[in-house]
Each structure stands twice: as C-alpha cells, then as structure tokens.
Amino acid sequence: MGKRIVVNAGVTETRVGVQEGNLLTELYLERHRQRSIVGSVYKGVVTNVLPGMQAAFVDIGLHKDGFLYAGDYTINLSDYARAMLAGGDEEGDADVDVEDLGTRPAAAPIEDMLRKGQEVLVQVSKESLGTKGARITSFISLPGRYLVYMPQARHIGVSRRIRDERERDRLRAALRALPLPAGGFILRTNAEGKGEAEFANDVEFLSRLWAQIQARFASATAPAALHEEGDLTFRVVRDLLSPDVDEFVVDAKEVYDKCLGYVEALVPALADRVRLHEDRAPVFEAFSIEKDIEKALRRRVWLKSGGYIVIDHTEALVSIDVNTGKYVGKRDFEQTVLKINLEAVGEVVRQIRLRDLGGIIIIDFIDMEREEHREQVFKALKRALAEDKARTNVLQISELGLVEMTRKRVRQDLRSILSVQCPTCRGGGVVKAEAPLAEEIFRAVRAKVAAPDAPAGREVVVRVHPDVARYLEGEGREAIERLGALIDRKVTVHAIPNQPDREAYEVRVRVGGAGAVQ
C-alpha cells in the first residue's frame, strides 16, 4: 500500500490523517469554531511600535494583536524570494536568479516606517502559539494548485522537491510563455509534469484574487479580514492530493460530496481516488489511525526490535532519546547499536512529522564509536527528513551521538492541540483536553447505537468526569443536541462523583423509561 488520505468529519472537528505504508505520518485537525488563519490576509491597524524589539503589534480583528517584525515589513525583494523559496513548508528552493529581482533599501528602523494608527496590509505566517499572537508579514503569498503567487517579487522559482534540471527548465519556460501579472511565482511540487493549460488557470485565479484583496483593502475599515484561507478539506485537496495518493477516504456523505467537488474542480484526473467510507467501524479505527494518535501522545515509543525512543518537551527545545531497551543483540555490540540507531531514524522522523514538532530538536542516538557508523546514521536521517514538507536544518552528528536540528514551526504541535496541562500535577503530565475528549465520546456514542446488537432504547446516557460533564453541558450543549439529532435519540450527560480519571467515561443505552441501562 502506498499513500492514503483519510478524512473524519466529526461533530465539532474535522481530522485528516495521511498514511504511508499503512502508518500514520501526518495528522491535521481543524475545529469548526477555530479554523486555521495561516495564509489569511487582513487590513490591520498598528497599535504599538516597539523600537527596542524592532517589532510592532497590529490589530487584525482577532483576540490577540498580530506580531510584525521589522524584517517582515521591510526586507529587500531578493531576501524575500530566498525566504519564500527556502522557508516555505513544502515549496522551498534555493535556485533563484536574484540579480533579476531588483531590490529595495535595506530595512530601516521600524519606528521610521510604522506609527501607531497606521493601516497595513498583512498576512498571517504563523498561528498564535501560547500567549503570543499570530506572526504576520506584509509580503503576501497566495497559493494555488500548481503555483504560489507573490505580488511583491519578480522571479519564477521552482520547488526544491523537483530535482530534474530539464524538468525545472521546462516548467519555467511553460510559465513564462503565459501573460503574467506583475509579481513573481513559485512552481509547486504538484506542477511537475504539468503545462501551460494548468498554469494558466492558476495564474488567472490568483491574479483575480490579488485584485480582489487590493479592492477590499481600499474600501474596508481596519481591522478587517480581506481573504480567508479555505477550510481544511479544501487545503488538503489543493496541497496534499497528488498522483501518488492511492485513495482519498471520507466518512460523511456531505463532506464527501464537498471533497469530490474540490477534486473535480482542481484535479479531475484523480476523482476516481475519492470514496465514501460506509462500513460500520469508524473510519480512523478501520485504518488503525486512532491507535497511532494515542501513541503520538505518549513519551515512549517502542521500536520493533525492542528498543525505544523517549520524546520530552521543554521550554527551549524537544529532546528525543534513543535507547536499546529489550534488544541486546547477539555478538557485536557496535552492530547492535548501529541496528537500533538505524531503526530509530525512521520512527524518529515519523514522530516528528506526526507530532508536528518544531523549533530546536535534539536527537540523542546511542553512542557510536566508529565514524563510519555515525556517518551511516546521519545519511539515513537526512534521507528520511527529505520526505518532510517542513523546512529542516540538521547539523552533523557529534561524537556523543547528538544531532542538533531545527524544524520550521507554523502551527501548534499535536500535543498542544490534543492536551492541556494536568490540573493535579501542574505540568508534570498531560491529559486530553475537553474538546477532543468530547469528540471521542461522541464517536463512542455513534458506534454504540450503530452496533448490530445495540439496544433499542430511545435515550443514551453518558457518564463522565465532572469537569467533562460541565464542558458538555456548557460549551458542548449545542454539539450534544446535534449528536442527538444525528442518532435520533436523546443524549443525557451524568457526572461521576469523585471520579479520579478525567478521561474515563461510560456510554449506555436506557431501555424502558427510567429502567435499566445497557
């Protein structure tokens, strides 16, 4: 089995899992009330200028002001192109003729360019993380299926993932043959093998979108949203669906119809890969994705050989420690160490991608005495990271077996999305947050009533921890009502007094008035 994309449409959130060889490698999650704002464009107003930080805060209409670095407002165009090509999540490429770009003056002090009350056109480049507001930039990039349009640049670049020089030259020539608007373009990985007809559609769409943004900026009162990125399913079809995807599975008819419409509009040749999941088993369980998500929240991940890796988060960095565990080898200790380290490479990179780890990452491989073994492990790590869409920078493995690397952080990591600080241990451990736990309970309810031997009662009783009960009866009340309508039964929430396990719950069907539950 090659590559599979699986979409789970829940009551309060949509989840998308990407599998390679039946293993989960990427997970995307979007709550219906908390859509991603990365890529969205705003008309903002400067609320504060900080000369000491060379940054400004900009009100873009969200609960926290956006953070604008001076370098994100006044970099010269050649630096802008390099940043886009080398820094994009999946479209980096250092092959740019920067002498053709033209330049602007070097960045001036931010207090000379921005003032309180000034209106600015900005785009969100990073989600709000923790107490920080979203990071924003004044240099706009608009992605299509095959192209990324950068109105402030003047060049044509090619994704670093397209390595064949003849193909790179052909792609540039095909795009240059079209009437292009002012600005620059990056040919995305999806452009490989495509030609003028496909590019013309993107050029027309993106240039029209840019004109609409400019017109809205001229008429809108700041702060205002000028352009919002599409929902998760649209972005997945646009950015992830490619010929190497064997199937695209969706578990809800309404979302299936929407996804199929996106595919038929963007890449009709792949419409036959889209199918509706109609089995009784929940789609993430049918493809063993649920258990991979559970494992991705654990510190320890076991390797097939009996070794294991331990992943720890600190304020400064993420550490990944490789251990021999139960594996003791046969004769040569050095070969044992090499075998475990090589096996760990694949799992380490998979966990980095799956957990969406970013910032500084330290990998502590088991110490290797031989230089050739260290080099072998390092090359294996570089090969594995080549499949990662996020930009990474890896330093050579040290004599102590340490690898220092950085990975571009755009969104919150999986741990931050799916868990909150434990109120009992105050950070020593984590438990599931109310929202994903509620969605897990909703899935359990739907599975309970859909089972072949499900009781015929008209009421489903959910017994949960008091904290979860308060969430379901408060913020989750609307979702409970929608769930009841979906299963055509009344859903009642009961708190379990003195329940020590916050994640424990029971789902039962009441059969016969106020009588027994099953």
Image: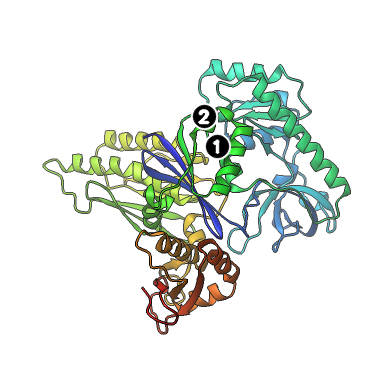
Residue depicted at x 49% and y 34%: 273
Q: Is residue 3 left or right of residue 473?
A: left
Determine whether 436 is above or below 362 in the image: below
Mark 2 — residue? 161
Instruction: Evaluate if marks 2 and 1 touch, with contact meaning CB atoms under 8 Å apart.
Output: yes
Q: For this rendering, which residue is in front, 181 or 2?
A: 2
Does any portion of residue 403 appear in the rendered image?
Answer: no
Mark 1 — residue? 90
Determine whether 169 is above or below 101 in the image: above
Where residue 205 sits, quadrant-wise, is: top right
Residue depicted at x 81% and y 49%: 120
Q: Is residue 288 left or right of residue 491?
A: left
Q: Quadrant of the N terminus?
A: top left
Does any portion of residue 421 appear in the rendered image?
Answer: yes
Within-10-Å neighbours for mark 2: few <14, some 14–19, many 20+: some
Q: Type of residue at label 1?
A: Glu
Q: Type of residue at label 2?
A: Arg
